[in-house]
Every structure is written in structure tokens, then in C-alpha cells.
Image (cartoon, rainbow, N blue to C red):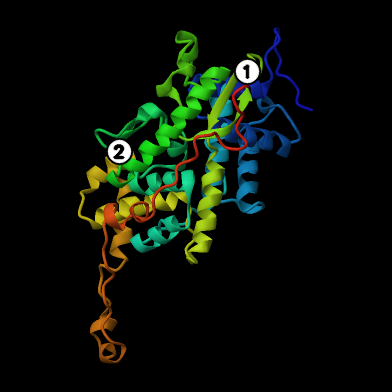
Amino acid sequence: MLAPPPSGSPQPRLLDRVRGAIRARHYSRHTERAYVYWILHFLRFHGMRHPLQMGAPEISAFLTALAVQERVAASTQNQACSAILFLYRAVLERNLPSLAHVVRAKRPKRVPIVLSKNEVRQVLNHMRGVPLLMASLLYGSGLRLAECARLRIRDVDLELGQLTVRDGKGQKDRVTILPKGLADPLRRHVAWVERLHQQDLRRGVGVELPTALARSHPAAPHEWGWRWLFPASGTYVVRGAGEQRRHHLHETVLQRRLRSAVQAAQLTKSASCHSLRHSFATHLLEAGYDIRTIQDLLGHADVQTTMLYTHVLARGGSVRSPFDNGPMASEAGPVAPPARTGLDGATSPLAQRRYQAPSSAPPASAPKPPSD
């Protein structure tokens, strides 16, 4: 049983204090869920003892068990360690001694999974509708999956050909490119979203806003610019407030569609949504763009992170094997270099196959406007 710390006044529950500390620092909801999970895992590992009754030895034993017994990845162990340190330093305000005796999971050095331009085309050719448009933005603009799903109408500038990513990784904003080949499909999609927006206005359905903007601007949840670019088909009711809102399309929708497209294209690579972002950076390097420009487009804080893609190029087809010039070259025949194509335009799958925007009516699972 988790015993409360000795105190003369009642205090909130421990996990509620953790959530409050995380939200006060404006950490993401993914971080909140992960930290609460690992803190609860840590407490259960030690029989639900209160963390004030434990210290560095108990933390070291838990982290070592993760690496030795559960054989978790190094990134998973580091996340658990960060959650526990946050608990002691930010919530309980206790300084811990060194954790030097922890057995660390070995972090493997891996290269990102990068698709060739032909493979990207094959995958996109097996997608349709909104998932196709979202996957095209991942590749054409170098977006992360969550960044794409959280785009709002005001973030798209078709005139300047750019996207604004707000509150991205590390709570940073950045501006990235918008492919010319996606301008017309986006216009048709935005027109459909506007029709859905008009139906939501008649029903009083709004959207969630960042921080406390809804309190200072009560009408903002119903404004056009704050609408999600990729809205969900259904709505939900806010607990306590009773307000009806529409969320953005869930990330798993695109993940499932992309996985099915990779299988349909019969690719042997374990490509994911993030592979499209890796391919964006690698293909820009192949086209001769400088590393600093790509760093800004990707939103990397350290250029060393972007430099990873230069190592991918160094191991790829830019190096000619001695086999091709050796004694077996005459028998095997010359190896033709792969054909290069542009990132958009006539070679784009969206240019070859007209993007099918949703029908004028909302999706079948979406609520219909009330009849008179």
C-alpha cells in the first residue's frame, strides 16, 4: 500500500501531483502518459512503497531490472530514468545521488530506413483519399506524423507555398516547404473541410485550442483558421464542460494505411511514416541542398542529427564498388545507375492520378446536421 508522506496538511495524490507538474511545464500529452506509466511501474516494482521511503538504490535496482530482466531498449530505459528523476526533482523536490551503478541497456547504432524515389512512388500509388494527402505531406514537407495530424487551416499558406509547424518537437515552431504538386489537392481538401466547418457551426461543434486561449478568446474554437486541416469523422463531449468538439484525425489511421500500402507495394523494407521524413532529407541531400537548409526544414536543434543522412548517402549508390571495375565486370555487365526523378511535378503520383477529395457530405460516421 502506498503510504502518504508525513505531513500536517492533506496533499493531492502523488500521480495527480505528477500530472500537475508536467502540465505546468507544458510538456506534451505523450510525455505525460509515458511519465505516469513509468512512475507507476516503478512503484509497483517496489511493492507500492512511497518514493520518499526509497532512494538511489531502489532506482538503480529498477533500472537494472529493465535492462537485464525485461531487456528493454536503451531509449526505453532512458525514458523510465527521466520519468523517475522528474518525480524526485520536480514533484518531491529531492536531490538524488549519482546513479552510476545502473546497468545501462546498450544503444545500438542504426541508420534510418530510407525509401528510394521509386519506392516512395510505389507506396503512394497504393494509397487513396486523405491518407494519401497526409503521406504526401510527410514526404514532400518532411513532417513528423504528429505534426501533420495537428496542422490547422491557418498553418497552410498556398500563396507562399509553405507550411508552419507550430509547437513541434521541443515546443518549437518552424516553417517548411509546401510542394507545388500538392497545391491543387490541398485546395480541394480545404474546400471540403470548409463545408464540414459550416455544418459544425450550425451544431455548435468547436475544436480544442492550445493552452488557455479559449478562455481569453471564447469564439476562437469556432473560427475557421483554428479548424484542423485533417478533422476526425466523429465528435466528442468535453468532460465537465459539456461542450462538443471535433478532434483531428488520429495518427493510427495513417499508420495503418501506410503499412497496408507498403505491403501492397511488396517492399522488403520495414518502412513507417517516419521513413517518409527520412526520405525527404536524404533526397534533398542527393539534390545538392546544403545541410543547414535541411536542418532548418526538419527542425533539428543540432546539426549532428541532420548529419546522419550524409552517412546514409556515403553508404549508398554514390560509391562505385570495385566489383564493377574488376575482373568479373565483363561477365556480370555494367551496373546502370538508378534513374533520378523530381520530388513533385509530372512524376508525382498525385499528378498522375487525380486526388479524390471527400464528398460534399461528411463521412458516414460523422454526425449529420439536425433536420428542421
Q: Secondary structure at mark 2?
A: strand
Q: Do labels 2 and 1 touch, CB within 8 Å?
A: no
Residue 372 relative to residue 184: left or right: right
- Which quarter of the picture shows residue 144? top left
Q: Secondary structure at mark 1?
A: loop
**Circle on res. 298:** none
Q: Residue at x 40, y 51 (%)?
A: 276
Could you say which is closer to the camera, residue 275 or residue 80? 275
Percent coordinates x, y for residue 126 in the rendering: 47, 57
What amino acid type is highlighted by mark number 2?
Thr
What amino acid type is highlighted by mark number 1?
Asp
Residue 329 visible in the current orientation: yes
For label 2, count other residues whose C-alpha is less than 10 Å away and answer few (under 14), some (14-19) or many (20+).
some
Location of the C terminus by quadrant is top right
Precedes in sequence: disc 2 or disc 1? 2
Instruction: Tell me: residue 19, above or below residue 183.
Output: above
Q: CA distance from mark 2 to mark 1?
A: 45 Å
Percent coordinates x, y for residue 70 in the rendering: 65, 51
Q: Which residue is mark 1?
A: 372
Location of the N terminus by quadrant is top right
Q: Which residue is mark 2?
A: 176
Residue at the front extreme, as displayed = 372
Residue 92 visible in the current orientation: no
Q: Residue at x 65, y 43 (%)?
A: 61
Could you say which is closer to the camera, residue 205 or residue 327? 205
Q: Please name which of the two marks, 2 or 1, marks the residue nearer to the observer.
A: 1
Instruction: Tell me: residue 369, above or below residue 350.
Output: above
